[in-house]
Structures are given as structure tokens and as C-alpha cells.
Image (cartoon, rainbow, N blue to C red):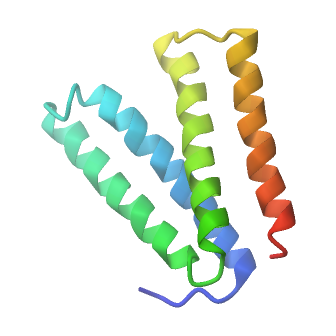
Amino acid sequence: MPNISNPSIAWLILLVAGLLEVAWAIGLKYSDGLSKTGIAIFTVVTAWLSFYLLGMTLKALPVGTAYAVWTGIGAVGAAICGIWLFDEPATVARLSCIALIVGGILGLKLLSGE
């Protein structure tokens, strides 16, 4: 695993890892319980890459902050994709909760000192 010592690069890699988390979460939905081989392979590869990139960022970022941001990106991205792709409800309460998660992600980034 390459050594990522520059926090700015680590944050960029963490963003990519979070977006890959969204991709594998949506892949799980499209794979119909991992029963569709091509989509299942895509899902497993993106999940592995997301974990790998998260691991790389932990060389430069605090584990609690990096993990919370990674899962937050995944949660917000999956919720937005669920609304957009699967007609899941976009209620005021649900969108408000998504906004709270985004606020938490931004707060952790700003308060991390990196």
C-alpha cells in the first residue's frame, strides 16, 4: 500500500473511496442479491477498492474522522441515488436528515486540523 503522508491528497483519496462506497451500495441493489454475475463482480471490486483507499488515507488522517467521513459520503450518496434511481421518498424529514449528515461530514473535515 502506498504511503500517503500529504493530508490534502489523503482527503481527495477519501472522497474517491466514499464515492466508490456509493457505487458498491447501488451495485448491491442492481445485482439482485449478488445473483447477477457482472454487476456482482463490479460490486465486489468497487467495495474492495473503496476499503483499500480508505486504508491508504488512514496513514495521514485520524481513523475516527476518516471513517465517519467515508461512511457519511456513502450514506448521503446512497440516499440521494435511492431517491433519484429508485423513486425512494424525498420527504422534508428525509432531506433534512441527509443535510445533517452533510453538516457532520463538513464539520469533521473543518475540525480535523488537516
Residue 85 to residue 57: above or below: above
Q: Quadrant of the N terminus?
A: bottom left
Residue 26 to residue 55: above or below: above
Residue 91 to residue 36: above or below: above
Percent position of residue 9, x then y: 68, 77
Tell whether 93 sits left or right of 60: right
Residue located 83% across and 53% down the image = 107
Tell whether 52 sits left or right of 105: left
Q: Quadrant of the C terminus?
A: bottom right
Residue located 62% across and 55% down the image = 68
Q: Nearer the viewer, residue 61 or 41?
A: 61
Tell whether 99 sits left or right of 13: right
Residue located 33% across and 27% down the image = 29
Percent position of residue 43, x then y: 30, 45
Which residue is outermost to the front? 64
Residue located 29% across and 56% down the image = 45
Q: Quadrant of residue 70?
A: bottom right
Q: Nearer the viewer, residue 42 or 93?
A: 93
Percent position of residue 13, x then y: 59, 68
Instruction: Tell how many labels.
Output: 0
Residue 44 to residue 4: above or below: above
Q: Quadrant of residue 14?
A: bottom right
Tell whether 26 sits left or right of 102: left
Percent position of residue 101, x then y: 71, 39
